[in-house]
């Protein structure tokens, strides 16, 4: 089956959300995200909504993926103040904020949920260095969190980079992710998410990557035959607010938002425990013929070697600020993994 979603253009969404009050005066705060309400971002957003509404007079209106357009639309709406909050992965903000592409340096992040949670809680790079990059784009960075190990889905098995030769692989519109799959031997093909299922169905593309829960939720297994996990990344996302809106709030309302973000973060880290395995079980139940391969350390070695090239590209793209950020990332990661 082909997934269809109701998508509004940026202009139509703006008209639909226009209000007479300024964003800072609004009693109802609008929050858009890139997934379904039952997926990881939706679970996080729902918990945030519950916390804000339980501790203030404000109401949170949630907009799952497809209701207000593609990722570029919701980002524009947030920068314009039509939306107060947006959840968007660095995969899309990487073009806007080049340093955010650090999350696409392969084999940088660990896969252990507990280690990842502690890293995102304590990282100086995330909590002290990143906010200034977002502020330059009119955004208040509120929280970053992991969503799970990224795995590939393809038509044919993948055991080494050579198996990706001439495979048109869908990637987000992120320059470093393009370099990632070039290094892995594929032909990276930037494509909006709404066109991915159909592209796989018609053969325009032959592969894509996502966390296991999204492969199951978006039914990517229906149009691919093999899942391969090479341990190269953990999908990360960021929740932001329109900066003018946030700066215009009272200290009390800002604290309500921060407390709700902290509660939602702890909730989503706990929620993800075992989610990868549960999602894989659902995929195999729906399609028993699906081939699943988890490469061991030796099998991953060629991919790890290729990743060195991508790290160099990141520094080339971002200069001194990116290199400083990357070094701080490594320092922060060492503190939680050793």
Image (cartoon, rainbow, N blue to C red):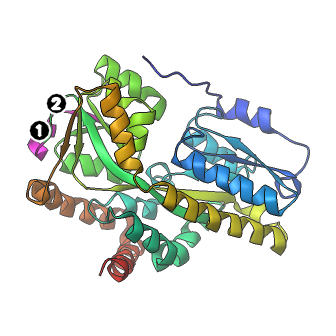
What element does badge 2 sit on? loop
SS class, disc 1: helix
Asked if residue 271 is positioned above or below residue 265 in the image, the reply reads above
At horizontal 37% and vertical 48% (from top left) the residue drawn is 276
Label 1: few (<14), some or many (≥20) within 10 Å? some
* Side of 226 where 175 appears, left or right: right
Figure quadrant of the N terminus: top left
Where does the C terminus fall, quadrant-wise? bottom left
Is 50 on the left or on the right of 69, as rendered? right
Residue 334 - label:
none
Q: Residue 127: give x, y in percent of width and height.
A: 54, 75
Q: Nearer the viewer, residue 137 or 148?
A: 148
Residue on which disc 1 sits: 163
Magenta segment: does it hold 36?
A: no
Residue that numbered label 2 is attached to: 156
Q: Give the magenta part as a residue range.
A: 159-169
Q: First in sequence: mark 1 or mark 2?
A: 2
* Crowd tier of the residue under label 2, counting other residues whose Cα lies within 10 Å: few below 14, some 14–19, many 20 or above: some
């Amino acid at each position: 089956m082909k997934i269809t979603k109701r998508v509004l253009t940026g202009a139509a969404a703006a008209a639909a959300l226009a209000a007479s009050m300024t964003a800072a005066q609004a009693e109802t705060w609008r929050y858009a995200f890139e997934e379904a309400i039952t997926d990881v971002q939706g679970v996080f957003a729902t918990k945030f909504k519950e916390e804000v509404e339980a501790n203030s007079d404000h109401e949170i209106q949630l907009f799952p993926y497809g209701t207000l357009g593609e990722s570029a639309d919701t980002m524009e709406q947030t920068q314009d103040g039509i939306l107060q909050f947006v959840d968007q992965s660095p995969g899309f903000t990487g073009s806007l904020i080049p340093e955010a592409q650090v999350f696409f340096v392969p084999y940088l992040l660990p896969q252990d949920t507990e280690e990842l949670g502690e890293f995102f809680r304590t990282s100086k790079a995330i909590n002290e260095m990143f906010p200034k990059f977002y502020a330059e784009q009119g955004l208040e960075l509120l929280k970053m969190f992991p969503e799970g190990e990224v795995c590939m889905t393809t038509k044919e098995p993948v055991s080494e980079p050579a198996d990706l030769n001439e495979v048109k692989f869908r990637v987000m519109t992120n320059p470093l992710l393009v370099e990632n799959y070039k290094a892995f031997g594929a032909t990276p093909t930037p494509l909006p998410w709404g066109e991915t299922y159909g592209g796989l169905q018609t053969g325009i593309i032959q592969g894509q990557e996502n966390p296991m829960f999204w492969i199951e939720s978006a039914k990517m297994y229906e149009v691919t035959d093999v899942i391969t996990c090479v341990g190269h990344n953990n999908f990360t996302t960021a929740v932001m607010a329109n900066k003018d809106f946030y700066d215009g709030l009272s200290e009390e309302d800002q604290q309500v938002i921060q407390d709700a973000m902290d509660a939602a973060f702890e909730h989503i880290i706990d929620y993800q425990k075992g989610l990868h395995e549960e999602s894989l079980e659902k995929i195999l139940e729906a399609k028993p013929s699906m081939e699943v391969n988890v490469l061991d350390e030796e099998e991953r070695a060629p991919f790890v070697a290729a990743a060195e090239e991508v790290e160099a590209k990141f520094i080339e793209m971002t200069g001194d600020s990116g290199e400083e950020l990357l070094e701080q990332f490594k320092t922060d990661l060492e503190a939680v993994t050793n």
